[in-house]
Image (tube, rainbow, N blue to C red):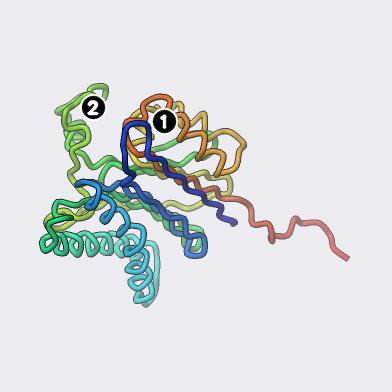
Amino acid sequence: MEILGVGLTDVGCKRKHNEDAFLCNLSDQLFIVADGMGGRAAGETASKAVTTVFPVMLHKNIQALQEPNPSSIVYTLGKTLNELSQSLYREAQHLPEIKGLGSTAVLLFIRNDMAYIACAGDSRAYLLRNQYLTQITKDQTVAAALVRTGHLSPEKISNHPLSHALEEYIGKEGNLNPGVWCKKLQVGDRWLLCSDGLTKGVTDHELQNSLLRSASPEEICQLLISQAKDSDGSDNITVVVVDVKQDSTTSSGENTP
């Protein structure tokens, strides 16, 4: 399989600074979106750590596995996110300018034709497969938890005062409990990672229609950001689109002399 991935970020229409960050590392097949919070310095520090420090930590922890398999990789992803979160929290206690920092994180890690997805917070991962869009991650917000426990109806979540109050985020006090999933890749899959600046104004139905277009990942990123700015634009907007293609080096089955 051939993996193509592109990311794009935009400050939006109302913010002065962009506290989002993203990573598209094709060689390691690691893709990340992070949405920082806590003020400009704190938010930028936290989201940058997710996209720069975490990959180094993950590489080291994966290398330490004697026999990497889906179960051990899922465990390692969660463990590494927790290690980063605790490290950032400790650092922030000694630096007043970044105290209270935090960041969401959503990532896609591809290894041996398996997709590993992890998230902390409300940045999302979606999968378009067989022309149908599925949200893989679950929002880790107080309002989403109320929906899952039956204390809030899904149609009321967008207007709930706790719809963006995070239960989990990188840099929190105590242990982080990220969500981690794994799925077998298929040729034709199209993955979307995004900050909530996209989903505040663009519905899942609109996302599906946009992702169904036979356009490059870069063109899809540009389209999604344009849609987000037209419909809402109140927050920073970051998207990463990853396509899974048939490997161009794979034999087509034709006879060769």
Q: Which residue lies furthest to the right in this view?
A: 257
Element at label 2 = helix
Mark 2 — residue? 157
Q: Residue 241 carries which label?
A: none
Mark 1 — residue? 228
- Residues marked 2 and 1 touching at CB (< 8 Å): no
Inspect the image, locate mark 2, and give the three-letter code of the amino acid beneath it.
Ile
* Left or right side of 223 for 85: left
Of callouts 2 and 1, the N-terminal one = 2
Q: Position of residue 153 (x, y in %)?
A: 21, 24
Q: Position of residue 95 (x, y in %)?
A: 14, 61
Q: Quadrant of residue 64?
A: bottom left
Q: Looking at the figure, which quarter contains the N terminus?
A: bottom right
Q: Distance between the residues labelled 2 and 1?
A: 19 Å
Q: Quadrant of residue 135?
A: top left
Q: Which of 239 and 119 is in front in this view?
A: 239
User: Which residue is pictured at 32% across the width and 35% down the height?
Assistant: 235
